[in-house]
Amino acid sequence: MGKRTNRPSRLSDPRLYPSWLGAGVFWLIGQLPWNLLLAAGRGLGRLAWHLAKKRRHVVQTNIRLCFPELPPQEQEALARRCMISTGEAILEMAGSFSNHRIKLGERLTITGIEHIRSAQAAGQGVLLLGMHFNSVDVGSRLLSYALDINAVYRPNDNPVIDRLINKGRQKYVEGIVDRMDIRQIVRLLRNGRVVWYAPDQDYGTAHAVYVPFFGVPAATITATSRIARMGKAKVIPCAHYRLPGGRYEIEFGAPLEDFPCGDDEADTARINRTIETYVRKHPEQYLWVHKRFKHQPPGQDHPYR
């Protein structure tokens, strides 16, 4: 027999009452002044470093695997900064979704927007090569100040959290698309739209190949090249960083030339190399709490044990 799942599907399910309470608290926290919100987030991250031992282990493992050139003390310091940055991101998301008084556009610097405008002037759709920096949700609001975008997302198993995230994002983006709806993504691109798509998580081994990410075999979906080819789109890297003083930067890179090349594995390896280049600029802000190397080639040890 398969594994039984009995997750609540109705928002009124009593089992979701704690989630609704949490959503209310989340909204209240989001009303704090922005710099105070970020300071509280850093405090949350420091607390998580001591209490969330399993997640801390994931971060430490990822840093050890991806930055072997660093001495152990520096690896540990980077891992700690990652947890603090993740705490900032959690409360940052609360403010981004619910605090409409804060003028984030005044805190934003954008570089490379000319790459988007050039593709649009040529009548092409743009597939933004997104990256899971931990400020990914405030990133959707920041991107809306520059572009009308459609964001590809992965539904959350908890319907309350899924509703919270989707409603938060839909206030700023043109539309959201389930990552499994390839036809809709391609349709948008062929109509000249801008679509944010992030392939840098471990989504399992189906439709994936093992290619290096920071020199470590990583199960990576091959859909990016197929979507770009079918959508006749330019693929443009898109990274977002948190700067000191509660400011932000969005960086658009130059379009990937000769992409796709026709070899899914080579294209996917290139995607990972491109993302790695941007992550190295602000490694403490990447989503290292995610088990990026959860699936490994046959015969390889599971790194998170």
Image (spheres, rainbow, N blue to C red):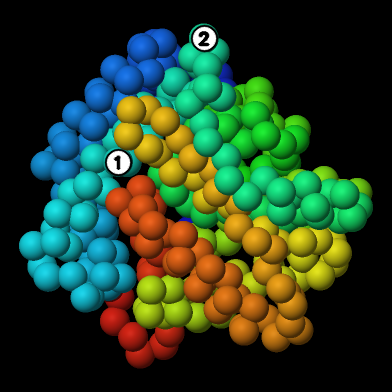
Above or below, comparing residue 119 to residue 144 in the picture: below
The x and y percentages for residue 22 are 38, 20
The x and y percentages for residue 66 are 31, 70
The x and y percentages for residue 9 are 58, 33
- Name the residue at the bottom extreme: 299
Q: Nearer the viewer, residue 146 or 101?
A: 146
Q: Label for residue 101?
A: 2
Q: Nearer the viewer, residue 80 or 250?
A: 250
- Kind of residue at badge 2: Arg
**Residue for point 26% across, 58% down:** 58
The part of the image, by quadrant, that contains residue 146 is: top right
Q: Secondary structure at mark 1?
A: helix
Residue 155 relative to residue 284: left or right: right
**Residue for point 75% across, 35% down:** 148
Name the residue carrying label 1: 85
**Residue for point 91% across, 52% down:** 123
Q: Secondary structure at mark 2?
A: loop
Q: In which quadrant will I find the C terminus?
A: bottom left
**Residue for point 32% across, 20% down:** 35
Above or below, comparing residue 57 to residue 294 in the picture: above
Residue 157 relative to residue 181: left or right: left
Mark 2 / mark 1, whichever is N-terminal? 1
Mark 2 and mark 1 residues within 8 Å of each other at the beta carbon: no
Above or below, comparing residue 53 to residue 92 in the picture: below
